[in-house]
Image (cartoon, rainbow, N blue to C red):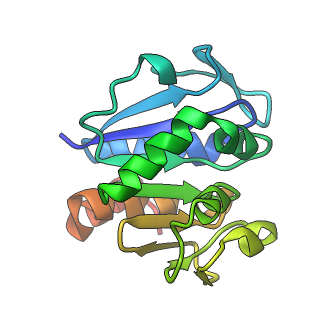
């Protein structure tokens, strides 16, 4: 079973975080929502409270195969400011683990230098923060071990792309058909 972490900070975009969790779990992944707030309850950008599976400081990240950053404001800023997450991302990148971010969150990957020479996408007002990337206007794009998505409207396509990255296109098409996504 593939292990995935979705990181949640106060102000995260609920649809971007939870759609990914739902789609990846449908594909058979073991997905854990990880709070970086120090509290299990994380407050979404649209006043939807979510109970995370685990706290960042209690989590063992040893077997993770993919790290996912939902966007939203100020959630993206809180993720970017979290020193432990920054170190984890740098280590994951060095080990060539799968890293994914959507909406404003790809700006974090840009600030860490992960997008240099890669295709990437983000919410339009965050495209300039994709340092070193060839910016594309696609709902989602994977370049090497980095997957990015544009925003809430691309959340299902982004989730399906992550299924494809972890399990292959056939599994992604199976989930797509099961959720009646056109």
x and y percent of residue 155 in the render? 56, 57
Answer with left or right where residue 51 lies relative to residue 25.
Answer: right
Nearer to me, 61 or 33 = 61
List the single residue furthest toward the left. Answer: 1
x and y percent of residue 113 in the render? 56, 66
Q: Is residue 8 above or below residue 124?
A: above
Answer with left or right where residue 51 lies relative to residue 163.
Answer: right
Q: Is residue 78 above or below residue 54?
A: below
Question: Which quadrant of the figure has residue 29?
Answer: top left
Looking at the rendered image, the quarter that the N terminus falls into is top left
Answer with left or right where residue 138 lies relative to residue 10.
Answer: left
Tell me what residue is drawn at x 43 percent, y 66 percent: 146
Nearer to me, 27 or 144 = 144
Nearer to me, 129 or 181 = 129
Nearer to me, 119 or 88 = 88
Tell me what residue is drawn at x 70 percent, y 46 percent: 76
Tell me what residue is drawn at x 61 percent, y 79 percent: 132
């Amino acid at each position: 079973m593939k292990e995935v972490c979705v990181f949640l900070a106060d102000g995260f975009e609920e649809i971007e975080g939870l759609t990914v969790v739902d789609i990846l779990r449908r594909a058979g992944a073991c997905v854990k929502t990880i709070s970086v707030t120090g509290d299990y309850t994380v407050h979404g950008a649209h006043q939807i409270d979510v109970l995370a599976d685990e706290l960042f400081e209690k989590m063992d990240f040893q077997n993770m195969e993919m790290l996912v950053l939902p966007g939203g404001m100020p959630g993206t800023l809180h993720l970017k400011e979290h020193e432990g997450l920054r170190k984890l991302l740098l280590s994951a990148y060095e080990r060539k683990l799968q890293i994914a971010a959507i909406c404003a969150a790809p700006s974090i990957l840009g600030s860490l230098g992960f997008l240099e020479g890669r295709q990437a996408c983000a919410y339009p007002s965050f495209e300039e923060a994709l340092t070193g990337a060839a910016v594309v206007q696609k709902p989602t794009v994977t370049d090497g071990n980095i997957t990015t998505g544009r925003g809430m409207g691309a959340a299902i396509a982004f989730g399906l792309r992550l299924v494809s990255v972890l399990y292959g296109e056939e599994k992604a098409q199976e989930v797509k058909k099961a959720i009646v996504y056109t």
